Image (cartoon, helix red, strand yellow):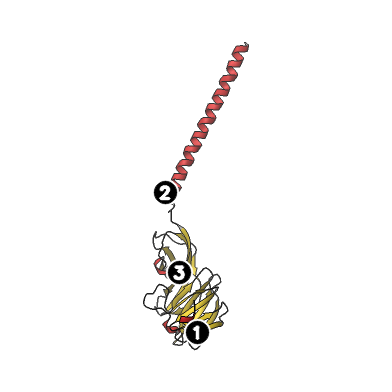
Amino acid sequence: MLIALLSFQYFNRFERAKNRSLQQSNYLNENADEISLKDKNTPIDSYSRTAFVLYPETNKQERYLFKATFLTDNQDTNDTNAVLIKQNGDSYIGLDAISGEIIPNFGRLVNTPFSIDAEILYSDTDYVIVKNKVNNQFQLEMIDSYTGQINWTLSNQEILGLEKLTAPNSSTSDSVVSSYYGDFKIQIPPNYYIVDKYGEITDFGNIDYIN
């Protein structure tokens, strides 16, 4: 009787151990499939990107500034080559230029339009600087990239020759805007201007005498 009882207990322990082993094996196999699928669907070089694009209105006389934040593997530094914009009536859709997928976090940053020949001269995660034409005169406008508020403007009387400034990806000019120790450097050969985040010109001189 004792031998039969011990044999029954041993058999039960063996069956429970075997069932646990099978459950763990199934769990690992299921998760391995899920991990494998995730790896296949997620691009290795995918990263979070924020892009700013000026897009013309239907009448082609004005352009609106749009902002898109999305995951992409597009390595092109030119934002206009990273985002495709499609217009359907009064609505706009942003698409990843590589994958063609719709960008959910996409929309107009500034409600007021810019001139048709406006250009984005500089952008980072906090600010966008646009060359805009108002009353047939070019001016610089610095925009908060989160609120869309225009924080300051500079006229062509304050920055001589600013109409020569071009987008950072342009190869036709060395008149550009860049970041400079927390401020902005506006380079229009042979001169430069240092402008702070409040629109104050803090320095001015010949390009040969600045780092």
Indicate the secondary structure of the residue bearing disc 1: strand
Specify which label sits upstream in the sequence, 1 or 3. 3
- x, y percent for residue 130: 47, 77
Residue 205 vs residue 147, the one in the foreground: 205
- x, y percent for residue 184: 52, 76
Give the image quarter of residue 120: bottom left
Residue at the disc numbered 3: 91
Residue at the disc numbered 2: 40
Indicate the secondary structure of the residue bearing disc 3: strand
Classify 159 as above or below 34.
below
Task: Tell me, yes or no, if residue 87 can be seen here.
Answer: no
Q: Residue furthest front?
A: 209
Quarter placement of the N terminus: top right
- Disc number placed over residue 1 in the picture, else none: none
Cα gap from disc 1 to disc 2, whole angstroms: 54 Å
Q: Residues within 10 Å of mark 3 (few under 14, many from 20)?
A: few
For image coordinates 58% across by 19% down, the residue present is 10
Marks 1, 2: nearer the viewer: 1
